[in-house]
Image: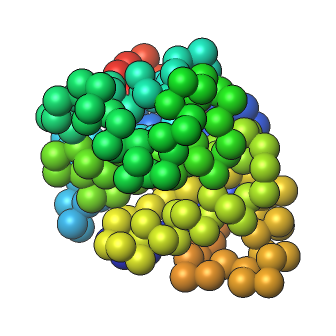
């Protein structure tokens, strides 16, 4: 993926999208091959510049946590003060102030994706996002895909990993893939046998 682009990669099963997200963002070593950034393999640079967003069991916020508390935590990750005033201002910027006291697990899929992605982009040095399995939250896939394309249009590199049904739904939408593109999974390192044995090497915090 490149800055200013949104790319969709298809991956099925419960664990495979998360494993692929960990590999692409430099948080797990692939079984074969390597992932490069600026034409060089550098896992540390990948972890610093690419945020892994909403990956099940790795970086997803607990469903019972209030949206306001998620925002406060993300502001701290970004090196900003996460007090009530700052949280309220951020929610207003996101257009989600009315949902401040809602558990994030109950938030509409599009609102969840926008909030988590835009907050992740505020972290120092983050230029890219790997969004994992947004289709698991339900809703219309073209909604969160549109958000991914908008973030790419603003300059971010965005990789979305989701299933075949989501891919088909987006392709059937009148705008189709919009400004994004779809990449065959076979082009990504480790796809041949992305075992989860290396998952313990992943960063446990949301990153």
The residue at 55%/82% (across/down) is 179
The residue at 50%/31% (across/down) is 100
Q: Is residue 57 left or right of residue 40?
A: right
Q: State whether residue 129 is above or below residue 197.
A: below
Q: Closest to the observer: 95 or 141?
A: 95
Q: State whether residue 135 is above or below residue 64.
A: below
Q: Closest to the observer: 191 or 174?
A: 174
Q: Closest to the observer: 70 or 130?
A: 70
Q: Closest to the observer: 159 or 95?
A: 95
Image color mode: rainbow
Residue 85 in the image: state x and y as whole percent.
Answer: 26, 32
The quarter of the rendered structure image containing the C terminus is top left
Q: Quadrant of residue 80?
A: top left
Q: Quadrant of residue 145?
A: bottom right
The residue at 34%/66% (across/down) is 156
The quarter of the rendered structure image containing the N terminus is bottom left
Residue 165 in the image: state x and y as whole percent.
Answer: 84, 56
Residue 67 in the image: state x and y as whole percent.
Answer: 50, 29
Q: Is residue 204 left or right of residue 98?
A: left
Q: Is residue 131 left or right of residue 45?
A: right
Q: Quadrant of residue 76?
A: top left
Q: State whether residue 52 is above or below residue 37.
A: above
Q: Number of labelled discs?
A: 0
């Amino acid at each position: 993926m490149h800055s200013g682009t949104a790319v969709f990669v298809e991956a099925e099963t419960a664990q495979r999208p998360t494993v692929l997200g960990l590999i692409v963002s430099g948080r797990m070593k692939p079984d074969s091959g390597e992932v490069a950034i600026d034409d060089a393999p550098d896992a540390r640079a990948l972890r610093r510049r690419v945020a892994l967003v909403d990956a099940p069991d790795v970086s997803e916020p607990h469903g019972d946590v209030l949206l306001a508390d998620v925002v406060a935590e993300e502001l701290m990750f970004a090196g900003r003060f996460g007090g009530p005033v700052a949280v309220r201002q951020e929610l207003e910027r996101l257009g989600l102030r009315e949902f401040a006291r809602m558990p994030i697990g109950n938030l509409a899929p599009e609102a969840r994706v926008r909030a988590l992605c835009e907050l992740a982009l505020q972290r120092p040095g983050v230029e890219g996002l790997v969004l994992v399995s947004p289709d698991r939250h339900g809703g219309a896939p073209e909604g969160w895909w549109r958000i991914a394309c908008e973030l790419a249009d603003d300059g971010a590199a965005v990789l979305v990993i989701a299933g075949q049904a989501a891919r088909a739904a987006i392709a059937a939408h009148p705008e189709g893939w919009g400004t994004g593109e779809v990449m065959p999974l076979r082009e990504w390192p480790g796809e041949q046998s992305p075992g989860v044995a290396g998952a313990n090497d992943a960063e446990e915090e949301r990153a």
